[in-house]
Amino acid sequence: MSKQDELNKITKELRANVPDISGVMIASDEGLSIATDFAEEDAVRVAAVSAAASGLGNRISQNASLGEPEEVMVKGRDGLLLIYLAGNNSVLAVRAPARGNLGLVRLEASSAAQSVRKILS
């Protein structure tokens, strides 16, 4: 199985394991989509903002002496976007509803990010 197939499998499994999730993306730290189930018009935007938010989260963590960030969360009235470091040059972004099962989303997304890290290392 190619790396691309493995990454696509992770996005599909994450969506299957957590029905509340409404979008999953693996993106480069440069803001380019690697694997996603977001609609094409959303994918470009989500990849770019996920990379930017990850970089900002990293700088905040360094300046506040928090250690390496595990996740960056942006919560809006209608939903949230969780962003995880998924290797040296990639992030995993997960969109979910604001009133979803956040514990399950975070647990499964963190595990998926670790799987992505292994594949891309």
Image (tube, rainbow, N blue to C red):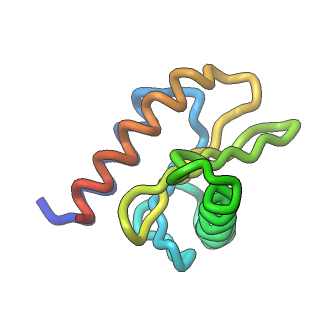
Quadrant housing residue 112: top left
**Residue drawn 53% across the image and 31% down it:** 106
**Residue drawn 36% across the image and 37% down it:** 111
Quadrant of the drawing holding the N terminus: bottom left
Report if residue 41 is visible in the image: no
Residue farthest along the right direction in this orientation: 77
Above or below for 27 versus 69: below
Residue farthest along the front direction in this orientation: 65
The image position of residue 19, as x and y in percent, is 52, 27
Residue 108 is left or right of residue 117, and the answer is right
The image position of residue 29, as x and y in percent, is 51, 73
Q: Judge by depth and name the residue closer to the eye, 58 or 10.
A: 58
Residue 39 is left or right of residue 77, and the answer is left
Residue 75 is left or right of residue 94, and the answer is right
Quadrant of the drawing holding the C terminus: bottom left
The image position of residue 31, as x and y in percent, is 57, 75
Q: Judge by depth and name the residue closer to the eye, 97 or 73.
A: 73
**Residue drawn 83% across the image and 37% down it:** 78
Tag count: 0
Q: Judge by depth and name the residue closer to the eye, 39 or 105.
A: 105
Above or below for 43 versus 76: below
Residue farthest along the left direction in this orientation: 1
Quadrant housing residue 17: top left
Report if residue 115 is visible in the image: yes
